[in-house]
Image (tube, rainbow, N blue to C red):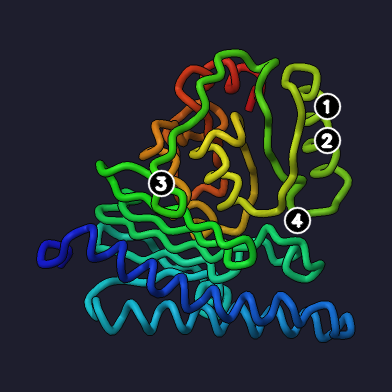
Amino acid sequence: MAENFSLEEFLASAVDAAKKAGEIIRKGFYQTKHVEHKGQVDLVTETDKACEDLVFNHLKQHYPNHKFIGEETTAAYGATELTDEPTWIVDPLDGTTNFVHGFPFVCVSIGLTIKKVPTVGVVYNPIMEIRFTGIHGKGAFLNGNPIKVSSKTELVKSLLATEAGTKRDKATLDDSTNRINNLLSKVRSLRMSGSCALNLCGIACGRLDLFYELGFGGPWDVAGGAVIVREAGGLVYDPSGKDFDITSQRVAASNPSLKDLFVEALQL
């Protein structure tokens, strides 16, 4: 099913879809400042759903035989199993808390897996006009310019990104803050930007050196970013050091020089 089209065509279609979704995000982003609390939640849901519908409809017109997995469809219809078929995996609005607060780290993430391998990726932040793209075997780009991961070789000189996670029970919070406490003495500093997809892209373009996250939403958070990191010369792996599983809700990323040091420091 994937044979009749080139990967470049897949990417071009994904970029078009991301641009259209970006217009919806941009419109909603500047509205959030004028709505009541209940309205904020409604606006997020509406923006999410509108973006996902738009992206899926755009891609289905071009590739009617492909499979589709999205955050909103999964929320509505239960988990969708990832198969070997070409599958578009979409996060229509990554960074929803940022979106509500008018903090500009929001994006639409579109990834295509073929035989379960992330192969094409687009991560587009329409507020800051930042577009990351990657095609398996063809490199990674930021607004059309080639990017590569940082060349850091020591944890102590590395900038780490992670997230506290969505759960607020004491056991989960203690786990995550204890881990962060332990890491803070070993790295230069820490950032929590609120977007898994943009954190991965931060690794890809060398703005960040280390990233891990546990218990994020699902494969839609990482499908686009994983391609971009790898094509920028980076590694994406399970925080334990094992192979990355796109369905596991566990991810770590860095340049190749830092992987073993990072895994040892994480102790997961």
Cα distance in 3D space between marks 2 and 4: 13 Å
Residue 177: numbered disc? 2
Location of mark 3 (residue): 145
Task: Work out whether residue 223 can be spotted.
Answer: no
- Give the mark nearest the N terminus, 3 or 1: 3
Q: Is residue 193 left or right of residue 233?
A: right
Q: Residue at x 84, y 53 (%)?
A: 168
Question: Cα distance, mark 2 to mark 3?
Answer: 37 Å
* Local secondary structure at mark 2: helix
The quarter of the picture where the N terminus appears is: bottom left
Q: Nearer the viewer, residue 2 or 191?
A: 191
Quote the CA–CA distance across marks 4 and 1.
19 Å
Q: Work out whether residue 6 or residue 148 is closer to the camera in this orientation and state it.
A: 148
Mark 4 element type: loop
Which mark is drawn over residue 166? 4
Q: Which residue is mark 1?
A: 181
Q: Amino acid at mark 2?
A: Thr
